[in-house]
Amino acid sequence: MSKPSDQSKAEKKLKWWQLSLLGVAGTIGTGYFLGSGLAISIGGPAVLLAYLLAAVGTYVVFDALSRMTAQHPEQGSFRSYAKKAFGSWAGFGSGWVYWFSELLIMGSQLTALSIFSRFWFPNIPMWVFAAGFGLLGLLIVFFGNKGFDRVENVLAVIKMAALVMFLVLAAALLAGWIGGGKYTPNAPLGYKEIFPAGGIGLWSAFIFAFYAYGGIEVLGIMSYRLKKPEDAPKAGKVMLVTLATVYIVSIGLAVTMVPLKVFNPKESPFVLALSSDHLAFVPHIFNGVLIIAGFSTMTASLYAVTSMMLTLAQEGDAPGMFARKWKDKYPVFALGLISCGLIAAIVMSLLLPGKVYEYITTAAGIMLLYNWSFILLSSGKLLKADKLSGVKRWIGLVLIAAAVTGTLFHKISRPGFYISLLLVAIIGACDVIVQRIKRKKEGHAAAEAPEEKQEEAGTGHIGSYSPPAHAGFRIKGIRLRRSKI
């Protein structure tokens, strides 16, 4: 009967290099495989600098979150820290910003999967593929995740194998070992070649570089499972150095193999780079791998939004009905709300088949960075102040601000910025309403409570957090169990 307890303990004992490996495999997804093409088409080869700077900003966020996790372990992670640092309004805002960012990321992934599928079936509308992948993902989440947990590990290996395959084949093509010598190195060296759209183009593409590192907040949550929590920053450094190296080398190879004018948001730059008369089958294999990898991250995002919705409802930051489960197992109401978001993404792919990926991806990236800003600001309140951490925090905030404001300078990314502002305004308005309702309820409860309990209630800390009493919740393929201690 001690098996669950033993299993829980075993799950918490990760070595730092295992966390790094999980981070690399879990972060690489459609935001990189397809979003990099969008970044290159806007900023040109100069996006290599954007991916390097985005890695620096991402590390700062991971470092802050992992140190908060090590010093103040909380089941709700970044949402709990926002609540402790600034009060319940921040917990509400952070939770809903994350929920919407993951919903938009899921819409972006669905669109990317549809684009990959049209590589084989160009005459079938995108919305058909989006509906099919969305329904399949909902069924997997509805019927449980035990089987998919094992499959996700396999899919993570497939993603890494795809990148290794690309690097090997690209090097062989450039060397003339295969492909009949079709490709010759054509590295952009002049200013106009590297910065075809100038500094503004690089600035506009910055958001898509950050988007490729999305998911780092989940690694912060996993830091509590390390054997030595103080190793979390080292795990983050190795993970991000690995990611940045893989991203920069692979994109660098792609821009030397494909003319800049050929890159577009509708095809993966890596499929384009591997296209060869002598290797006609390779792009098909790689495209299949991209679909498998994209579907795994899309389903993980489904788990994330479902888990966050359950938590928000259980803590009173969302209608209580969304915490209910049919037969105490199936989150029907939460999945029903998420289905509405998926339907909206599918309708957008029907109405705007040419621009939906760009709009949704930009909005998803911006919402993700809003939540990362919450993490950095919370760390400033909760962690012990020192000059180095303060400098790193400001570097992170400046890089995030640069990525967000850069979206205003390009017609493709500008609508996504306005979408994010609309969502933040809606969340802010709802936050004000919910906090007023909570204060009224607390006032009535205090008035009816015995005098001793009123005095006891007055000693609490603003923004204190109590984990919900549910058995566990799931974020991006990670089950977090509440401690039985």
Image (tube, rainbow, N blue to C red):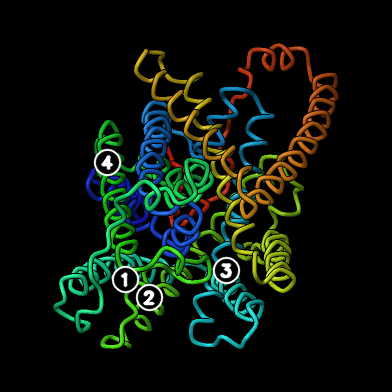
In percent of the image, x 32 and y 45: which residue is there? 12
| Circle 4 crowding by C-alpha within 10 Å: few under 14, some 14–19, many from 20 | many
Q: Which mark is residue 158?
A: 1
Q: Is residue 263 visible?
A: yes
Q: Which mark is residue 289?
A: 2
Give, as a three-letter code, the residue at label 3: Leu
Give, as a three-letter code, the residue at label 2: Val
Instruction: Look at mark 3 in the image and give the residue it sits on.
Output: 110
Q: Is residue 226 above or below residue 329?
A: above
Quarter of the image with the C terminus is top left
For marks 4 and 1, the one nearer the N-term is 1
| Circle 2 crowding by C-alpha within 10 Å: few under 14, some 14–19, many from 20 | some
For marks 3 and 1, the one nearer the N-term is 3
Question: Of the residues tagged 2 and 1, which is closer to the observer?
Answer: 2
For marks 2 and 3, the one nearer the N-term is 3
Give, as a three-letter code, the residue at label 1: Ile
Question: Of the residues tagged 3 and 4, which is closer to the observer?
Answer: 3
For marks 3 and 4, the one nearer the N-term is 3
Marks 4 and 2, Cα distance to the nearest angstrom? 27 Å
Instruction: Look at mark 4 in the image and give the residue it sits on.
Output: 235
Q: Nearer the viewer, residue 438 or 369?
A: 369
Relative horizontal placement of residue 433, taking residue 3 as reference (left or right): right
